[in-house]
Amino acid sequence: MVLKTFGWSFAVTALGLVAAIFYGGWTAFGVVAILSVLEISLSFDNAVVNAGILKKMSAFWQKIFLTIGILIAVFGMRLVFPVVIVALSAQLGPIEAVDLALTDKDQYQQYVTDAHPSIAAFGGMFLLMIFLDFIFEDRDIKWLKWLERPLAKLGKVDMLSVCIALIVLLVSAMTFATQAHQHGGTHVDKAETVLLAGIGGLITYMIVGGLSGYFEDKLEEEEEREHEAEEAAVRSGKPRSAVVVAGKAAFFMFLYLEVLDASFSFDGVIGAFAITNDIVMMALGLGIGAMYVRSLTVYLVRQGTLDDYVYLEHGAHYAIGALAMILLVTIRYEINEFITGSVGVILIAWSFWSSVRRNRAIAAAEGDAGSDSKTEVSSGV
């Protein structure tokens, strides 16, 4: 079962890591491995959400999502999108950007370095909004209760996450951007660049969130119409064509999944810039990670259940928040790639272990309750 589901992912991993060694030696191997783990950890909740929706779809639409969808996810968002970011930031054509990355790494590195403040501001704001919207939402299951309970109460204030994000952006532009530009040139231009890029990241997040909400509403409307049509058919005793309605619902599910996948892939792509500026290593690492996300989705669907490790989603979002702050700090200061990559892994591992302990405690409590009831029965109570 595992080999059948993850076979292609294992093969892509082996090829990707071997390609990384040929490309840049063991250093590249390490960076690609970290990027792969980062993409998987940040997108684990994506796989869970995908599985929850995908299991409602027919085999045909599942196949469409796992074939056409993987092309969009891997080649579109993980490979093309980083090129577009660099091309726009460095004012290069996409072909020129790719050619430069492969033929003149020093010049390409210089372009990326010059564009890094805008990339970091854009990505930092996008990631920060994902994190803030998560921690300000009141959830039944809380991981760090001492922190999440008061934040959930604060989250009742409308637009609080947007206000905090804008404050963080202003502080970053006034401190990191200004200090970064003191080494040469006028600091106003750099601060303006950071502000504009940060606002762009905020707008992008709101657009993606709006589209996701739109498709979610459409999906709910289609499901409600299908349910009403089924009830009407039962009352009238006449058969109805369920194919059309089911097809519309499945189509909206597909669109909704693609928008969700795009929104989740932003954090992996943007977060990768905090680890490396090398577009080849970025493509290899994110491509490997994206394959595992798809395999995880298939695995969860075929198993017929969502994951029992309830704190993993929390750990992934805390990792997103940490990456957001790291990106904003890197506008001014250089942070070691190992530290950047390790933060997310540590948070995910911590949340996983917390989930294991929670499951053990629940199992122990159920076992004690079962033994108590047996004792009562055997004693004639």
Image (cartoon, grey):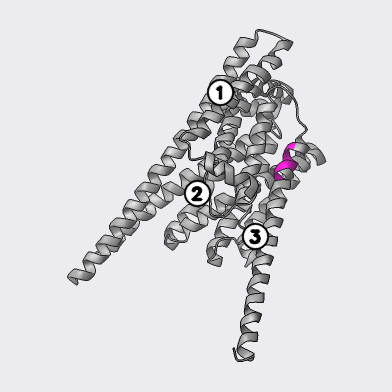
Question: Toward which corner of the image does residue 244 lie, by quadrant?
Answer: bottom left
The disc placed on residue 7 is 3
Q: State yes or no: residue 316 in magenta.
A: no
Question: Is 105 rendered above or below residue 55?
Answer: above
Q: Residue at x 69, y 13 (%)?
A: 181
Magenta region, mostly helix, strand or loop?
helix
Q: Residue at x 65, y 85 (%)?
A: 375
Q: Which quadrant, please, contains the C terminus?
A: bottom right
Q: CA distance from mark 3 to mark 1?
A: 40 Å
Q: Which quadrant, please, contains the N terminus?
A: bottom right
The disc placed on residue 69 is 2
Image coordinates of residue 217 in percent, x first then y, are: 36, 47
Q: Residue furthest front?
A: 381
The reply, left or right, for residue 309 in relation to residue 222 is right
Q: In the depicted view, which residue is nearer to us: 131 or 66?
A: 131
Image coordinates of residue 12 in percent, x first then y, are: 66, 51
Q: Residue furthest top?
A: 186
Q: CA distance from mark 3 to mark 2?
A: 18 Å
**What residue range appears in magenta?**
340-345
- Helix, strand, or loop for circle 2? helix
Neighbor class of circle 2 (other Cα within 10 Å; few <14, some 14-19, many 20+) is many
Cβ–Cβ below 8 Å for labels 3 and 1?
no
Q: Residue furthest left?
A: 236
Tally the marks.
3
Image coordinates of residue 151 in percent, x first then y, are: 57, 41
Question: Toward which corner of the image does residue 20 lie, by quadrant?
Answer: top right
Q: Amino acid under label 1?
A: Ala
Judging by the rendered image, the residue that carries numbered circle 1 is 197
Which callout, 2 or 1, points to the residue nearer the camera?
A: 1
